[in-house]
C-alpha cells in the first residue's frame, strides 16, 4: 500500500492525484484479484498502479508527461558525470528529490522502482511492460543523469 | 573486458543482476582499473543517498481507511451488474472484499522484508554447503597474516582478518564465496566442535553497526556493518556465544 502510494506519488507529482490513483488501483486490483496468477503480489499491484497512473496522466495532461518515453529518441547523450564530484550536494534531501523529479517519467519510474522499492530488473520489466534490456538502460541513464544534476554547481535561483 | 564494456554492465553489476561469469569478468576489470572502480563507488554512494527513507512517500493514514471503506461498498455493485442480488449475497461480497483487501495490505508489507529473508536463506545455505561439500576452506591457516594476503587478487576488496584464538574462537582458514550476487570473503572460525562462517563483503546497505540476530533452520545469524564492509556471521552455535564472538570481533 505504501509502495503503491509511493510509486504513484513519484509518477504524478502531487499528493491528491496520487491518493486518487492509489485508491483506484487498489480497488481495481481487488476487482481483478481472480486475475492474479501468483508470483509477487507487490509487483502485481505495482503493475496496476503504474497503468492507472499513466492513464491518469494521459487523461489529465495532454502534453508533456503524457508522452510515452521513446528510448530510441532519447539516445545516450551521455554527459558523463565526474564521479569524484558526484553527490557533493546530495546531502540535501530536497535537492535529491527535485533531481529525481527532473528525470523523464520513464527513467524516474525505473529508478524509483529499483532504488526506492528494491524491485529486481525482471520485476521492473514486468511492471513497466518493457524488455529487461530497456530497464537496464533506463536505470543507468537515470543514474547518470542524477549524478550529473547532483554534481553540477548549485544554481542560485532567481535571487542571483 | 575493456572499460567500455564494463561501463555498460556496471549498473547491472551494482544491482546484483549479472550472472556469475559476467560478475567475475567485471570484478577482474575493476581490480585493475581505478577509474571503473571509482564509477562503481559513485553508484554505491548514489544508492545509499536514494535509499533514504525520507525520499519515500508515505501514504496518508486516512487513505488506507478510505480504500477499505470504498472496497467494502463499491466492489459488489461494480462487479455484479445484475443488481437484483439477494441482500445476503451482497454482504457476503463485502466481507470477502474486506478480507481480500486486508490480506493484500498485509501481503504488501511482507516484501519490504523479503530481501532480508532472501539474504538469511542465502547465507544459511552457503554455510551448510561449506560444511557439506567438504569445501570449508580454500586456504587453511590459523595465521591471519597468511589468510589476509591470500585474498589479494581474488577479491576487489581487502577483507579485515582477525584471529580470536586467545578468546576461544581460533581462525582456521578462509574461502571465496558468492553472496548477494557478488564475490565475498568467508572467514572460518572454530569454537570447540562448532564452525562459524563469517561472510564479509563491501557494504552497500545502510545497515548499522548494531548486531542484528536472525535464526534459520536451527542456525543463528548475526549481521552488522561498518562504513566499508558488511558482515554476516552464521553458525550452529547458540545465540549467546555467537553474539560473544561478534562482540570480540568488532572490539578487537
Image (cartoon, coloured by chain):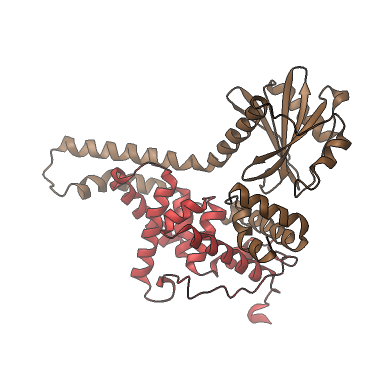
Chain colours: A red, B brown
The residue sitting at 35% across, 64% down in the picture is A55
Q: Looking at the figure, which quarter contains the C terminus of chain B?
A: top right
Question: Is residue B176 something one can see in this rendering?
Answer: yes
Residue A126 as seen in the image, left or right of residue B48:
left
Q: Quadrant of residue B216?
A: top right
Where in the figure is residue B176, as x and y percent of width and height? 72, 39
Q: Looking at the figure, which quarter contains the N terminus of chain B?
A: bottom right
Where in the figure is residue B29, as x and y percent of width and height? 72, 57
Taking B136 as reference, is B103 above or below it?
Answer: below
> Residue pushed farthest left?
B84
Nearer the observer, B197 or B68: B197
Taking B134 as reference, is B149 above or below it?
Answer: below
Taking B171 as reference, is A55 above or below it?
Answer: below
The residue sitting at 35% across, 44% down in the picture is B68
Q: Quadrant of residue A58?
A: bottom left
> Residue pushed farthest top?
B193
Q: Quadrant of residue A59?
A: bottom left
Where in the figure is residue B191, as x and y percent of width and height? 77, 21
Q: How many marks?
A: 0
Question: Is residue B208 something one can see in this rendering?
Answer: no
Residue A34 as seen in the image, left or right of residue A12:
left
Where in the figure is residue B32, as x and y percent of width and height? 77, 57
Nearer the observer, B218 or A57: B218
Taking B83 as reference, is B125 above or below it?
Answer: above
Residue B184 as seen in the image, left or right of residue A50:
right
Amino acid at each position: 500500500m505504501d509502495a503503491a502510494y509511493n510509486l504513484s506519488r513519484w509518477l504524478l507529482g502531487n499528493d491528491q492525484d496520487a491518493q486518487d490513483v492509489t485508491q483506484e488501483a487498489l480497488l481495481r486490483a481487488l476487482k481483478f484479484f481472480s486475475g492474479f496468477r501468483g508470483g509477487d503480489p507487490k509487483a502485481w499491484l505495482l503493475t496496476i498502479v503504474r497503468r492507472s497512473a499513466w492513464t491518469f496522466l494521459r487523461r489529465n495532461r495532454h502534453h508533456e508527461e503524457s508522452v510515452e518515453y521513446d528510448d530510441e529518441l532519447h539516445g545516450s547523450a551521455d554527459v558523463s558525470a565526474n564521479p569524484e564530484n558526484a553527490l557533493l550536494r546530495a546531502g540535501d534531501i530536497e535537492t535529491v528529490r527535485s533531481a529525481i523529479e527532473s528525470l523523464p517519467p520513464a527513467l524516474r519510474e525505473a529508478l524509483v522502482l529499483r532504488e526506492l522499492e528494491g524491485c529486481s530488473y525482471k520485476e521492473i520489466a514486468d511492471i513497466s511492460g518493457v524488455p529487461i534490456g530497456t530497464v537496464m538502460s533506463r536505470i543507468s541513464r537515470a543514474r547518470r543523469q542524477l549524478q550529473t544534476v547532483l554534481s553540477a554547481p548549485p544554481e542560485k535561483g532567481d535571487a542571483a | 573486458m575493456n572499460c567500455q564494456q564494463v561501463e555498460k554492465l556496471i549498473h547491472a553489476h551494482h544491482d546484483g543482476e549479472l550472472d556469475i561469469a559476467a560478475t567475475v569478468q567485471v570484478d577482474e576489470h575493476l581490480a585493475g582499473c581505478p577509474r571503473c572502480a571509482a564509477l562503481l563507488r559513485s553508484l554505491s554512494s548514489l544508492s545509499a543517498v536514494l535509499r533514504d527513507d525520507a525520499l519515500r512517500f508515505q501514504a496518508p493514514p486516512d487513505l488506507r481507511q478510505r480504500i477499505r471503506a470504498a472496497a467494502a461498498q463499491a466492489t459488489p455493485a461494480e462487479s455484479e451488474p445484475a443488481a437484483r442480488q439477494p441482500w445476503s449475497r451482497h454482504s457476503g461480497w463485502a466481507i470477502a472484499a474486506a478480507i481480500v483487501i486486508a490480506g493484500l495490505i498485509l501481503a504488501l508489507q511482507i516484501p519490504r522484508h523479503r530481501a532480508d529473508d532472501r539474504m538469511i536463506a542465502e547465507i544459511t545455505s552457503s554455510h551448510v554447503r561449506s560444511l557439506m561439500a567438504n569445501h570449508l576452506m580454500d586456504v587453511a591457516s590459523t595465521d591471519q597474516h597468511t589468510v589476509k594476503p591470500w585474498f589479494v587478487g581474488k577479491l576487489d576488496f581487502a577483507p579485515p582478518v582477525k584471529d580470536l584464538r586467545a578468546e576461544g574462537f581460533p581462525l582456521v582458514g578462509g574461502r571465496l564465496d558468492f553472496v548477494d550476487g557478488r564475490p565475498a570473503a568467508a572467514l572460518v572460525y572454530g569454537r570447540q566442535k562448532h564452525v562459524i562462517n563469517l561472510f564479509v563483503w563491501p557494504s552497500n546497505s545502510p545497515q548499522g553497526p548494531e548486531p542484528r540476530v536472525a535464526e534459520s533452520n536451527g542456525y543463528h545469524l548475526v549481521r552488522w556493518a561498518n562504513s566499508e564492509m558488511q558482515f554476516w556471521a552464521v553458525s550452529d552455535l547458540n545465540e549467546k556465544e555467537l553474539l560473544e564472538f561478534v562482540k570480540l570481533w568488532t572490539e578487537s
